[in-house]
Image (spheres, coloured by chain):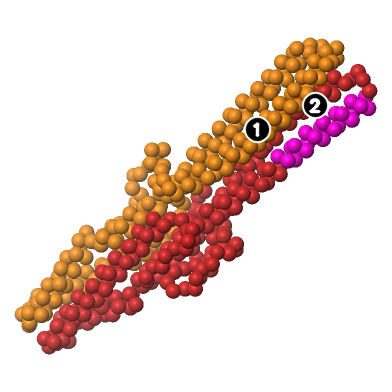
Amino acid sequence: MPDAGVKMAGSAPAAAGGGGGPKFKRHLRNYLLDKGLQLRYVLFVTVLSVLLTGFLGYFIYYQAHYATAKIVESMSDGDPALAQWVGDSLQSDDQGFVLLMAGACLGLIGVLSLYLIVMTHKVAGPLYKMGLYFDKIRDGHLPEIEDLRRGDQLRDVFSHFQEMVAAVRVRAKKEVVVYGELLAACDAAGVPSAGELGHRLDELRALKKSRESAIE
Amino acid sequence: MGKPPPNRGYKRSWKNLLINRRYQLRFTLFMVLVCAVLISGLGVWVLKRVHSATEVSITNVQGRPDVFADPEQEITTLRRRQTAVELGLVGMGTLICVGLFLYGIKMTHKVAGPLFKVTSYFDKVKGGRYDQVYNLRKGDQLVEFYEHFKECHAALKKKEVEDVEVLRALVKAADAEGLAARSPEVAARLDEARALLKQKEAGLA
């Protein structure tokens, strides 16, 4: 399954993201977040189901058809019309079982596909959400991370992500305090804003502002 | 774009296929269980059907021995075919369940691997360390997700590098101009900035 990564951009409504967006509700249309990956799973279970029921159907056909042939053969010296009727009846019965097996195959495909789509959605959902947060962090924000929805998978991974962002936010807040206090002390001590030191203090001021806006 | 970070010489092996046991086993065992239940249910039904067809046919052969050249041979053939069906069913069921289990574990491993990697980077960043992010292994899933993470990690690291540059230049200018001598308060705050710089440098080392 090459390059079947969980697609982020444009593959699910933006409401799935975190950070103060509207509550994301599970809808059937949202169950195909990464169609490539999920349809590959469906293809896999289809092949598996066809193999499984195909073998079972073949086993029935293998023996039942042979047994029917023997019964018809045993009637070969009797009434040909009766032998024909019995043969047709038994063969129709055999075919009925094969059709039933085809029905079981479709049922299996349906159940397993639904399960895989739901399971991959429960994995794809948190990954999609993290992906949106990644983009926010890349763009210079340090948002507070909302919890996952009930029933979502990958809670361990997500909680590590939450802890990471929380730690980075704490450090950013601390930096704002350290920078702010140094700048205030320099202002109180009358450090001139001109010259090399003044320029460096201006840079620090810009850095503080950037940190403040990141954790807003 | 610089040279892409290399892959570490990590090879897949059956020993470390179970990275995230809970997720991998849950995902895989459900499929195996559904298949096992279905194979068992349908298998029993198939066996009953085959058994019934065989018995009817044998009774028929026994009732009309004159029609068949070798009735005993016919009965033996019917029984042998029934045994073949029974063995085939058990073999097929076992093969599908074992195959499905291995496939499921391998399939989920390709998702669990990148997640394990990302989680370890989360923990490092949480501890203030911004290591080099290595590429995924060939065949791993979540490529796009991982690329997003790499961009996010690169942005965080870039910020740290910028912080270090600004603080280093500030400390240098402060030392050159004797900023600490201006007041005890400035000296104390400058020391805090120095400590912060040291911490950030250690995280990037």
Q: Which residue is mark 2?
A: A68
Name the residue located 85 percent from the left edge and 19 percent from the top edge: A74
Disc 1 to disc 2, C-alpha distance: 20 Å
Q: Quadrant of the C terminus of chain A?
A: bottom left
Type of amino acid under label 1: Val
Which residues are drawn in magenta? Answer: A80-101
Quarter where residue A171 is shown:
bottom left
Q: Residues within 10 Å of mark 1 (few under 14, many from 20)?
A: some
Instruction: Say which amino acid is labelled 2.
Output: Thr
Our reading of the magenta stretch's main secondary structure is helix
At mark 1, the secondary structure is helix
Residue denoted by label 1: B44
Q: Residue B88's image quarter?
A: top right
Q: As displayed, is residue A95 above or below residue B2?
A: above
Chain A color in figure: red
Taking the view exactly as shown, the residue that stands out farthest to the left is B181
Determine if marks 1 and 2 fall on one subunit: no
Q: Which chain is rendered orange in the image? A: B
Q: Position of residue A100 (x, y in %)?
A: 73, 41
Q: Relative to B43, is B159 on the left or the right?
A: left
**Residue B133 visible in image:** no
* Of marks 1 and 2, the one in the foreground: 1
Reply yes or no: does residue A51 show up in magenta: no
A173 to the left or right of B65? left
Q: Chain of mark 2?
A: A
